Image (cartoon, rainbow, N blue to C red):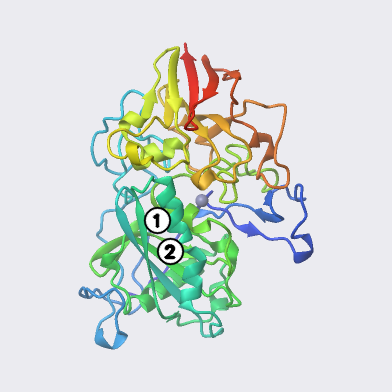
């Protein structure tokens, strides 16, 4: 099979970086292009990409399995790879099959056909659910035009254990992301410059890159052992562009080692990389959407929807823990930790989202972390306490954060919007990705009525253990 034409549909996704020159590195304030800016580093999103069809690479045939994850190529007689043209299309444009009916109750929005829908009444089984240990292989790709000057171990250390620790904290220990970094470079057959790697990548060149990477890696990797695939390019190769880091979704899974590969994370980060970038990309592998706002002309603020308040909005956020809604979706909050407020007024105690589960609370008695008021067929208002703990240890402000969730809105189009309880003020200039929302939470002693919704939130006090006592009234 020699055909290699692959068509791609670009879709708003992750954020390409625009780094300032060293002279600008400590500059504060807004960049001239108004991409958000943290410590002088500006970021605009990395697009996530769908690949409707992936055709077989040249000269490759299906082969057998080998139980060893990193194999001596000499032991392998046939390169096993790609692709099952008859495989069922796993299009990410439609909702995949449900795993099971949810017992999540009346506040659980239904999952819609929107890409990465925030609906969570069922899980899309086209994605691995991170409520158990998942194994991720890191394949380090070098190029003939640039002998590597760093080691795979050094590159692995750019992302791990930090990425695993982020998820360990976010999931209260329920999810382990277990990395399996390759010990040796896997050499690509062509020069790095030959692929014309960049953010909005020529489809044929991208297909060539993926095809070459899979073919080069396959003798070394048993893909059937892994839930997640990271292709990490040598950051020093001249053709590597960090703006090209993204998740590539295949509507038609690729086959290798008898397993379907539905998506890969292609990493082109610098060394050292942007903070939390791999955690953000990995969030997409778990069906989480992009939460930033993508200005139509590429200019303007990217962080108007959620500011600092979720990794999927910005990996540079001061409080990048995942929203309680996402933790509910991923299975990290137990049903009893989510309070569905029907009308009220209802008084509840919210544990800080980022705080670890207290030893006494392990098992069945975890505290409430999320309150939800359903406002429509596909909409809800969510409340959670955000304090300086865990992934949020560097938060700018503390209090009860209010946001709207829209289950029918696609990734990158604003599926979550933080409601600013202090719209007339800003906080943390120079550190926040979007100072207007940095002071969004409702503080102790304040009562806030959500504009346009009949929802009132009164934050009464904090408990001795640091939880927030809140009264919620709806309707
Ligand atoms: Zn993204």
Q: Residue at x 33, y 78 (%)?
A: 220
Residue 172: percent from left, percent from top: 38, 45
Image: 48 above or below 239 = above
Residue at mark 2 = 6
Residue found at the very far front of the displayed protein = 464
Helix, strand or loop status at disc 1:
loop
**Quadrant location of the N terminus in the rendered image:** bottom left
| Count of numbered circles in the view | 2
Q: Whole-percent x and y of residue 381?
A: 48, 25
Query: Residue placed at 54% from the left, 22% from the top?
Result: 461
Quarter of the rendering containing residue 449: top right
Nearer-N-terminus badge (2/1): 2
Residue 241 placement (x, y as % from top left): 59, 68
Tell me if residue 49 comes above or below residue 273 in the rendering. Answer: above
> Could you classify mark 1 by the number of other residues whose Cα lies within 10 Å: few (under 14), some (14-19), or many (20 or more)?
many
* Tag 2 near tag 1, CB within 8 Å: yes
Mark 2, secondary structure of its residue: loop
Q: Which residue is mark 1?
A: 52
Residue 379 appears in view: no
* Above or below for 34 versus 323: below
């Amino acid at each position: 099979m020699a055909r290699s034409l692959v068509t791609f549909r670009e879709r708003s996704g992750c954020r390409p970086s625009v780094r300032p020159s060293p002279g600008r590195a400590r500059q504060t304030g807004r960049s001239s292009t108004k991409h958000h800016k943290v410590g002088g580093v500006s970021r605009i999103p990395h697009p996530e990409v769908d690949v409707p069809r992936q055709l077989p690479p040249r000269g490759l045939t299906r082969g057998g399995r080998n139980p060893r994850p990193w194999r001596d190529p000499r032991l392998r007689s046939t390169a096993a790879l790609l692709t099952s043209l008859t495989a069922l299309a796993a299009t990410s444009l439609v909702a995949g099959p449900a795993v099971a009916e949810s017992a999540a109750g009346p506040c659980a929005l239904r999952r819609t056909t929107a890409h990465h829908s925030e609906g969570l009444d069922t899980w899309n089984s086209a994605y691995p659910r991170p409520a158990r240990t998942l194994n991720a292989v890191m394949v380090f790709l070098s190029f003939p035009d640039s002998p590597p000057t760093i080691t795979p171990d050094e590159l692995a250390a750019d992302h791990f254990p930090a990425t695993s620790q982020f998820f360990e904290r976010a999931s209260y220990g329920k999810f382990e992301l277990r990395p399996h970094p390759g010990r040796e470079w896997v050499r690509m057959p062509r020069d790095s410059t030959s692929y014309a790697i960049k953010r909005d990548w020529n489809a044929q060149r991208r297909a060539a890159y993926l095809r070459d990477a899979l073919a080069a890696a396959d003798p070394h990797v048993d893909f059937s052992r892994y839930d997640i695939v990271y292709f990490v390019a040598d950051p020093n190769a001249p053709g590597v562009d960090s703006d090209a880091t993204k998740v590539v979704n295949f509507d038609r899974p690729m086959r290798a080692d008898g397993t379907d590969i539905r998506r890969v994370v292609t990493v082109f980060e610098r060394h050292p990389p942007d903070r939390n970038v791999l955690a953000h990309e990995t969030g997409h592998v778990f069906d989480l959407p992009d939460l930033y706002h993508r200005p139509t002309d590429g200019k303007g603020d990217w962080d108007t929807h959620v500011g600092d308040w979720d990794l999927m909005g910005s990996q540079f956020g001061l409080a990048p823990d995942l929203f309680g809604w996402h933790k509910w979706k991923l299975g990290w909050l137990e049903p009893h930790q989510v309070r569905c407020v029907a009308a009220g007024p209802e008084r509840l105690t919210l544990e800080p989202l980022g705080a670890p589960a207290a030893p006494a609370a392990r098992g069945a008695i975890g505290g409430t972390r999320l309150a939800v008021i359903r406002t429509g067929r596909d909409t809800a208002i969510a409340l959670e306490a955000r304090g300086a703990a865990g992934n949020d240890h560097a938060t700018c402000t503390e209090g009860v954060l209010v946001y709207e969730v829209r289950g029918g809105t696609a990734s990158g189009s604003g599926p979550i919007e933080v409601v600013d309880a202090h719209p007339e003020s800003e906080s943390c200039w120079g550190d926040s990705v979007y100072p207007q929302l940095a002071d969004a939470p409702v503080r102790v002693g304040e009562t806030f009525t959500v504009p346009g919704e009949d929802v009132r939130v009164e934050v009464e006090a904090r408990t001795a253990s640091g939880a927030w006592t809140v009264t919620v009234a709806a309707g």
